[in-house]
Amino acid sequence: MHTTRIDVILKTLDTRAREKTREFKRLGAPSLTDVVIVDSYITSANLSSDEKEQVLRSLVNPNIERGTIDNTIIEKPFTVAIEIGYLAGVTDNVGTTAMETITDVTSREHNDASVSSARVYALYGNVNDLEVERIKKSLYNALIERATLVTWNEYVAKHGFSKMIPHVDLHSTASADIVSLSVSDEELLAMGTAGIKGADGKRRGPLALSLKDMQTIREYFKTLGRNPTDIEIEMIAQTWSEHCKHRIFASPMEGLPKGIYKEYIKRATEEIRAKKGKKDFCVSVFSDNSGVIEFDKNWLVTHKVETHNSPSALDPFGGAITGIVGVNRDAIGTGLGSKPVANMYGFCVGEPTDTHPLFRDERMQEQMLPPRRILDGVVRGINSGGNCSGIPTTHGFLICEDRFRGKPLVFAGTVGLLPRKTAGRKSWEKAARPGDLIVSVGNRVGLDGIHGATFSSVKLDEGSPATAVQIGDPITQKKFSDMLVKEARDLGLYNSITDNGAGGISSAIGEMARESGGCRVDLEKVPVKYPGLAPWQIWISESQERMTLAVPKNKWKELSELAKRRGVEVTVIGEFTKGGQAQVAWNGKTILDLSLAFLHDGWPREELAIKEPIRVLTPLKRSAQSEFGTDMLALLSRPSIASHLYIAEQYDYEVQGGSVTKPVQGRGRVPAPSSVTKPVLSSKAGILMTSALYPTYSDGDTYKMAAASIDTAVRQAVVGGANLDSIAILDNFCWSRSNTPESLWDLREAGRACYETALAYETPYISGKDSMHNDFRGYDHKANPVSISIPPTLLISAIAVLPNALDAVSLDFKQGGDLIYVIGETHDEFGGTEYGAMYGHATEGVPSVDANAWAKIYKSYGRARKYTNAGFAVARGGLATALNTMAIGGGLGYEIDLKKLRGTYTSRHAALFAESQGRIVCTVSKRDRESFEKIMGANAVCVGKVVKDDVVIVKDAKDAIVATTVEQLQLAFEKTFKGF
Amino acid sequence: MKTKPKVIVFSGYGLNCEAETKFAFEEAGGKADIVHINDVIADPKMLLKYQILAMPGGFSYGDDTGSGKAYGNRLNNHLGPILTEFLKRDTLVIGICNGFQILTAAGILPGALTYNESARYMVRWVDLKIEGNSPWTKNLKTISVPIAHGEGKYVPREDGQVNIAFKYTEGAMCEYQHLPMNPNGSAQDIAGVISADGRILGMMPHPERGMFFHQRPDWQVQKETFKNKGKKLPMYGDGFALFKNAISYYNKKVTK
């Protein structure tokens, strides 16, 4: 075989290499002095020497780069070089692009030739084997990549790096296996837990099915008079998984015969919609991939927030990028295709400074990544996924808490835009019709992402499957996204669309088959990355960047021609049918034949036992020495409060040109809790996005935890520019120990809060998702068993439409002399708060919410907001932190007096640091004082004023209790993540 | 009714700012079409219907093999002669961000763009001082617009030949947010360059993201100042002038 290797190196300063040098040193290679990066392309194309030169010229920009053909490129002897390339069969985007370039410049086809891309890191200085190993590990993911060490002598002797191109060995033709269910209950349970046994005797990975589930499946096949195939069991497991069916939310509980979802979440929305009557803005809720609400007379907006926790624990970069790109697909798969217009992210990780090792196995071979690595990885993942896709990241947050080190939470959300009508149809309605072709769009299927749905439905431990990690390829997705939502949708080329997320085509086609009443798939037609995959693997693989369409037969030609022009792969893999069966064939032979009724509704319902947990609550233990000023600064440096500007500013929030109030606000560039963006440049209207969560409140009371999350999200929306009656919310429950009655009791309480609080604010739920098993079971550095469960968490995201986007109000102080108002009451509430965490981990006195009373105040605020010029919803860190954030934002000081504050608080530190909900701080110019006070009445008290000098003064009547400067505040706020 | 100048905005393979770029040209009085590069390749002559060519921002080919390279190669290999013909006429070209990277990779503008000094993708606002003569920047002195890029450090040709369009400077935004003036380590603080006759402009900052006043990071502070003076908030931001200039370049000719 002819192979050619082209190496490219930067002639100018390579800042990537400089950053890698720093990163590797930090990993523990102190004597490393330098890193040189080489980008390589190895091709099997048969090229003449002239052509090789042509190709070289198109891969090298002579102003900044130099390249070599089949020769050494590095002149200075390195200590060792690490070459990272892809494993055989893995999608190689860079290689694909390089191959296109070769075809372009040589003006001829190179049949069967390919390019394999690689990157070399040559290390200089005194690095030992152990350090090299550590660096190597940080550079690649063994699931998809290979890493090779090259010594200087080898390099010189072979005149360069290896010219090997990895290729896949053909396997024998795979087929579906029959699985006998005539086995003992023990074996059934083992199968449900660890998977079907393969021919090699190894189990294939978790099905996450209980014994009762397995028995139900056995009964079903008994009535059919046959044993199931492996692909049938896998499809049932995927469909019935907690991840896909949300069984805990759907199961009856004491006092809730229809379960939490129907009795609390869905019921709240139904009652609110009925109450709103003509003012109801919901268009499609809970039934599609995102919730859909009205935007203006021509447009609708969609919103969905997902979690990608389990994959992010194993591969933070891969987990986060597939999280964001995956939720983008939820938008594209909503209605007939919603165009993504805004992304949000949220990370809950361990304390970044924590370096205590944790292991998944007792032999301490499989070490969990430390919180800092996880944080770095997820930050990069959202960066790559969001920026590459051209979708602004308009909102995000970071929470750091010790209990997230076993399993981080990674939230990703996408707002989309849908025209009300497209190709003469209502855009939010879709249905595959019998006879429609099943068309697969986008990437090919590989082994990546097998058992993702079932894996995320169980706890993380030694048996967690490595193949559950998927790889993201945002550009492939961008290409089909543009083709679908900018062209094919409006040409009416398909009747239905959904994304292939958890559960792959099994889930996507299984869901769409319900619209038409059945499906028949010819599985061998599914495009694969490499041969040899078993049918069940093709069926449930979660290989990314794929969607499924229902295409009328007479539209296929037009669609396939369009796809060809746009560089998108589309393939017919079957047909939607009627008759109620899901059928899959493999080379003509039926290997799956399940009734849709059994598949979707056959899972056994069991009443979930609940039991009130016994909580021993600890009070605040404030030390006598602590000073208000010092506490104030310490709070600003706490990682859940401190500035995470370094994250926000590396996510493009300006693309699409819609930003109004940005995720980074004011002179001091403060990450903001809400933002407003204009998804339609020609419309006046805008959308506000915000979110709130209080995981640690769960240590005291999950009802209050949930109520506070809703209140804060709603309040942030109201402060930022939304009117209360225009806010919709989304729920993301992330729970732990969900198999225990105590945890389920807590869940029910949170559900009750969701119902009661949303009803009071009349904020309907439009979409939701839950992730119930955020537990880690493993070992510490002495091989002692450890289990870590996250504090039960509810993320509430809010979205609201502003008829005039320019009504938005940012958080930063605007000018000296403006009056500072506090709305709401302050109480001695420290349970689960940031201040409480500083002093004895207080759990007593979790902040309460009085939504019925506060709804009236928020409505008034909506009318008074136009007289405010800055606003902040008091949240983490209390009143002091709210004021300080506004001061840093504006680069202006303030003077306040606590004595006028309303509420039952009994101490100055409660006035400053308690996290009582329902409070707003805002500033009003003197010229608007009367107009503002007339609307707010006694609910707003003026506590002081903004000053243009760099001074911050807090008084309590005559006593000055804090005197500091904005500069000090800003230093404290920014120091935590300096250098990240 | 006079005919509006026609603008072609390229798209495809991961470019992603085509919609707002089209919007800016149309708001300025032009008629803009977004056309996928493959549709231009299928019918190259269509290019000659247009007066203005815009290569918008984005992530063409995911920056694989280097930002702008693969798209630049595609332009050269499939549209080389027609582009030459297009450029010979009295046309205007703008490359924004990835579009600028594409124009340099294709050799239409000199120099190259490489990794930021920080080696990190960065979003912020910058201030630009206008240099040189170009229809695009006529009557402008300084403007403030945002950047969002990972490879925006300009490296001139080895012979040093470059016609500078914009230099990063210390202006309103740097003062407002205490920012260093050069965000990426560009040589000579270069933010954008022009062809010798000024008709082709390449720039890393995004004028289309600064076309409205409310896109400025300080618009809420300014709003107070305007209110104090009893004035209305302006509608447009600094970036809009570039699009206006391009359109009036043709409109003035028509009236002549």
Image (cartoon, coloured by chain):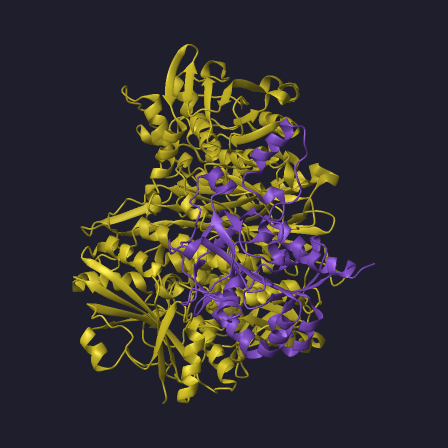
Chain colours: A yellow, B purple
Which residue is at the far right? B1
Does residue B69 appear anywhere in the picture? yes
The quarter of the picture where residue A315 lies is: bottom left
In the image, residue B206 lies at what x, y percent?
A: 55, 54
Task: Examine the rendered structure and indicate whether residue A70 appears above or below residue A512.
Answer: below
Q: Quadrant of residue A952?
A: top left
Q: Residue at x 32, y 53 (%)?
A: A373
Q: In the rendered view, does A467 fall on the left or right side of A330?
A: left
Residue A450 versus residue A979 in the image, above or below: below
| Side of A125 relative to A771 (left or right) | left
Residue A310 visible in the picture: no
Camera-side residue of A607 and A939: A939
**Measured from the top left, where is residue A934 in percent x and y?**
66, 19
A122 over A609 or under it: above or below: below
The percent coordinates of residue B114 (x first, y second) are: 42, 62
Q: Quadrant of the N terminus of chain A?
A: bottom left
- Residue A802 image offset from top left, x and y in percent: 65, 40
